[in-house]
Amino acid sequence: DAKTTQPPSMDCAEGRAANLPCNHSTISGNEYVYWYRQIHSQGPQYIIHGLKNNETNEMASLIITEDRKSSTLILPHATLRDTAVYYCIVTAQGAQKLVFGQGTRLTINP
Amino acid sequence: GAGVSQSPRYKVAKRGQDVALRCDPISGHVSLFWYQQALGQGPEFLTYFQNEAQLDKSGLPSDRFFAERPEGSVSTLKIQRTQQEDSAVYLCASSRQGAQGANVLTFGAGSRLTVL
């Protein structure tokens, strides 16, 4: 019953922008888009979230389409340390659990 | 501490043994979550506490799994009579109370359980 669809893997050159897509065509009006990442042998790490406006923080930018059916996480200048599995999660604000899918395995190449 | 601390980091158990995994959440974080992550898979929700109250245990796979948080801080996940299919990384996460913070979880590094 996954609410999101992500490509299983992506590659990006170091120093370039990494653009990770996420499809969430069944998103409801009260649901937010959250992004987490999981570096090998670590727990997941929160990156960013948004409702309908684009968001930016020190880690990444989140671009949400006007119809909210898809979004893109942008790492503007990818480094080798950005190699991780990236999870896109759709959930209502204040929901008591996050449902993780399979995520996208992003590999940053030197 | 600054983060969520889990112990032990690694545990090897013989099939049929009981194990206990500990989680120290970030001080002041009201919400605490346990997740199970099998190799190559995303984390799967097990249970959720708000303070000492276990509000959701729908993800616990069987009655061999039990979690508690008696004083609303440290939590323990106990697995009785371990089976090989219990082998996984068990992740603990905590978050602040309130709508804005509720879904911003801070995860620990996890406890890797291997059942022989």
Image (tube, coloured by chain):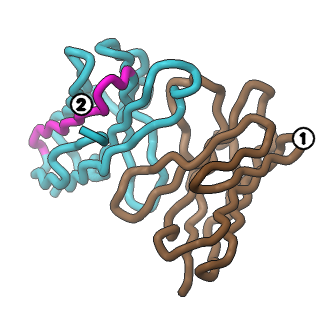
In the depicted structure, whether residue B13 falls above or below residue A98: below
Name the one closer to the observer, A56 or B104: A56
Q: Residue beneath label 2, please?
A: B64
Q: Overall secondary structure of the magenta stretch?
A: loop
Amino acid type for the residue under numbered disc 1: Asp
Q: Determine crowd level at label 1: few under 14, some 14-19, many 20+ residues with C-alpha closer than 10 A.
A: few
Marking on residue A67: 1
Q: Determine crowd level at label 2: few under 14, some 14-19, many 20+ residues with C-alpha closer than 10 A.
A: few
> Residue reaching furthest bottom?
A110
Chain letter for brown?
A: A
Marking on residue A8: none
Instruction: Give the letter of the chain under mark 1.
Output: A
Chain letter for cyan?
A: B
Quarter of the view holding residue B49: top left
In x, y percent, where is residue B53?
A: 33, 12
Q: Which residues are magenta?
A: B16-30
> Residue reaching furthest right?
A66
In the depicted structure, whether residue B62 falls above or below residue B49: below
Residue at image point 51% right, 30% down: A97
Quarter of the view holding residue A29: top right
Q: Is residue B97 magenta?
A: no
In x, y percent, where is residue B11?
A: 15, 52
In the displayed structure, does residue B19 sit left or right of residue B107?
left
In the displayed structure, does residue B88 sit left or right of residue A84?
left
